[in-house]
């Protein structure tokens, strides 16, 4: 099977149902951003310790589910056999709480940077926020599972906490914002 189909050469792509829509559609932007986020998280997973890598791989699988849900056609929905659940959000919250116990309380705004791993994680966080904003906007015209936006919101918090946690593991001082 060839990787190229030429079916998108005129600026359209297919949803899960097969219906063709513009590649500039908000739905495509949303799941494209989730795909971009998944790639950034893959990079972070490649440069961090094993326990974090395993957690990030789990998150990547969930992001693939989210991308699939976003690619589903609201006019002809297909039962994908999965969804994003409250337990997915709770799982992220537990991870955040576990890392947070190891960190000093946050008293200042901090700047991204200090080490490539921290910077990659912060980039993933900002891409996650963009994906969340796009899903919030998409939800105005096509109702999404509320857990999807909640998951992305919590994931950005997890990535912020992970960046701080990585700084601690790496012995890197956080860069405090000076007004």
Image (spheres, rainbow, N blue to C red):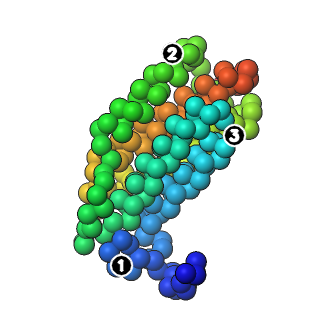
Earlier sequence position, callout 1 versus callout 3:
1
- Name the element at disc 3: loop
The residue nearer to you, when weighing 107 against 74, is 74
Task: Tell me where residue 70 appears, x and y as whole percent.
Answer: 37, 60
- Name the element at disc 1: loop
Question: Mark 2 against mark 3, which lies toward the viewer?
Answer: 3
Residue at the spot x=59%, y=53% of the render?
A: 39
The residue singled out by tag 1 in the image is: 18
Say which quarter of the image contains residue 13: bottom left
Residue at the spot x=27%, y=67% of the render?
A: 78
Residue at the spot x=48%, y=43% of the render?
A: 58
- CB contact under 8 Å: marks 1 and 3: no
Visible residue check, residue 176: no
Task: Tell me where residue 40 appears, x and y as whole percent.
Answer: 61, 49
Cα gap from disc 2 to disc 3, whole angstroms: 23 Å
Task: Tell me where residue 175 appears, x and y as whole percent.
Answer: 70, 25
Task: Tell me where residue 42 appears, x and y as whole percent.
Answer: 60, 48
- Name the element at disc 2: loop
Q: Residues within 10 Å of mark 3 (few under 14, many from 20)?
A: some
The residue nearer to you, when weighing 57 against 145, is 57
Tell whether 2 sits left or right of 62. Answer: right
Residue 47: mark in rendering: 3
The residue singled out by tag 2 in the image is: 101
Residue at the spot x=30%, y=61% of the render?
A: 80
Question: Mark 1 against mark 3, which lies toward the viewer?
Answer: 3
Q: Residues within 10 Å of mark 1 (few under 14, many from 20)?
A: few
């Amino acid at each position: 099977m060839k990787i190229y189909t030429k079916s998108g050469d005129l600026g359209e792509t297919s949803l899960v149902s097969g219906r063709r829509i513009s590649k500039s559609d908000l739905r495509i932007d949303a799941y494209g951003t989730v795909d971009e986020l998944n790639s950034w998280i893959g990079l972070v997973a490649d440069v961090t310790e094993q326990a974090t890598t395993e957690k990030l791989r789990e998150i990547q699988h969930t992001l693939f589910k989210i991308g699939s849900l976003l690619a589903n056609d609201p006019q002809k929905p297909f039962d994908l056999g999965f969804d994003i659940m409250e337990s997915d959000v709770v799982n992220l919250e537990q991870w955040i709480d576990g890392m947070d116990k190891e960190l000093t309380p946050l008293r200042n705004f901090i700047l991204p940077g200090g080490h490539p791993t921290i910077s990659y994680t912060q980039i993933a966080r900002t891409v996650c926020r963009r994906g969340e904003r796009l899903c919030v906007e998409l939800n105005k015209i096509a109702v999404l599972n509320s857990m999807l936006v909640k998951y992305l919101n919590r994931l950005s918090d997890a990535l912020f906490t992970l960046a701080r946690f990585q700084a601690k593991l790496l012995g890197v001082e956080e860069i405090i914002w000076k007004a």
